[in-house]
Image (spheres, rainbow, N blue to C red):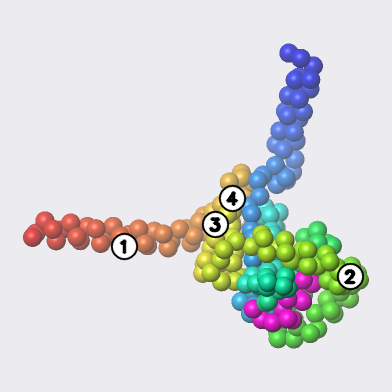
């Protein structure tokens, strides 16, 4: 066996051993992707960001989730290369603010608290107070305002436009590539279902799986009963 092949195999077995013996093997597990396509002034979007999405941060589930936020939603690109947002110019501005926050603070622990703060003001119908989030979270305002006022902000929004998939409404929540449609509030159950790792996820249990599959089971039972009834009617005819 060659030296380099031997070295590669040794590295592989060492990595596998580290995954096996470390106290937390989360880093060795494949995370479940969770994407939220939204627009800043959409009431349903702010409700989801403020009241639902934080649940994955409270119990450690976020360690198993790859969260992606895309602030674009139903915005349209006009012929003159400007943007037309569903809720007006203020939404276009705040979409860019949040896009810039995602860019200048790529760390989830920095950009999510900021976006949550902004969306909290929106949720409580007082979005003009969004700038207070900088001081509240001890974040540098100039990093975002320079981005918003420069070419970078528009560049980011065009990128988000390209990333946004065809959708029927917002918030548009996608777990592991699967759109959840109107069932988006149950996104945690879908995360539990999509997870293929061996390390238990906080917040997931057998009851979660049962809750997730209950609708499909009900539909399946209904179809089965319908077919059986049709067969009996045909036999008695």
Q: Nearer the viewer, mark 3 or mark 4?
A: 3
Q: Are marks 2 and 4 in contact (CB under 8 Å)?
A: no
In this rendering, position of residue 83 left or right of residue 171 = right
Q: Identify the residue position indicated by label 1 in the image.
A: 222
**CA–CA distance between discs 1 and 3?**
24 Å
Would residue 89 be counted in the magenta stretch? Answer: yes
**Residue at x 56%, y 52% (from the top left corner):** 194
**Residue at x 61%, y 70% (from the top left corner):** 171
Assign a secondary structure to mark 1.
helix
The answer to whether 222 is drawn above or below residue 47 in the figure is: above
Q: Which residues are magenta?
A: 86-97
* Mark earlier in primary sequence (3, 4): 3
Q: Nearer the viewer, residue 11 or 37?
A: 37
Q: Are marks 1 and 2 in contact (CB under 8 Å)?
A: no
Q: Is residue 171 visible?
A: yes
Assign a secondary structure to mark 2.
helix
- Quadrant location of the C terminus in the rendered image: bottom left
The answer to whether 25 is drawn above or below residue 4 in the figure is: below
* Mark earlier in primary sequence (3, 2): 2
In this rendering, position of residue 217 left or right of residue 6 = left
**Residue at x 59%, y 64% (from the top left corner):** 173
Would residue 80 be counted in the magenta stretch? Answer: no
Q: Identify the residue position indicated by label 2 in the image.
A: 146
In this rendering, position of residue 176 left or right of residue 107 = left
Find residue 195 and name its label.
4
């Amino acid at each position: 066996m060659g030296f380099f092949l031997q070295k590669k195999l040794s590295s592989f077995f060492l990595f596998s051993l580290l995954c096996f013996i470390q106290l937390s093997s989360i880093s060795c597990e494949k995370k479940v992707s969770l994407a939220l396509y939204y627009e800043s002034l959409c009431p349903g979007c702010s409700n989801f960001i403020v009241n639902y999405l934080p649940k994955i941060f409270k119990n450690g589930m976020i360690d198993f989730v790859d969260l992606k936020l895309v602030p674009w939603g139903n915005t349209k690109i006009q012929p003159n290369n400007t943007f037309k947002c569903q809720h007006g110019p203020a939404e276009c501005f705040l979409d860019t603010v949040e896009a810039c926050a995602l860019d200048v603070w790529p760390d989830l622990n920095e950009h999510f608290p900021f976006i949550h703060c902004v969306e909290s003001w929106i949720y409580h119908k007082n979005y003009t107070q969004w700038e207070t989030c900088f001081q509240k979270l001890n974040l540098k305002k100039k990093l975002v305002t320079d981005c918003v006022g420069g070419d970078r902000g528009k560049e980011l929004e065009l990128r988000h436009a390209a990333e946004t998939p065809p959708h029927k409404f917002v918030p548009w929540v996608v777990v592991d590539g699967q759109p959840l449609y109107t069932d988006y509030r149950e996104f945690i159950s879908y995360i539990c279902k999509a997870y293929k790792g061996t390390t238990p996820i906080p917040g997931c249990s057998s009851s979660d799986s049962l809750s997730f599959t209950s609708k499909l089971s009900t539909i399946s039972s209904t179809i089965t009963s319908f077919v059986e009834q049709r067969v009996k009617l045909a036999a008695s005819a």
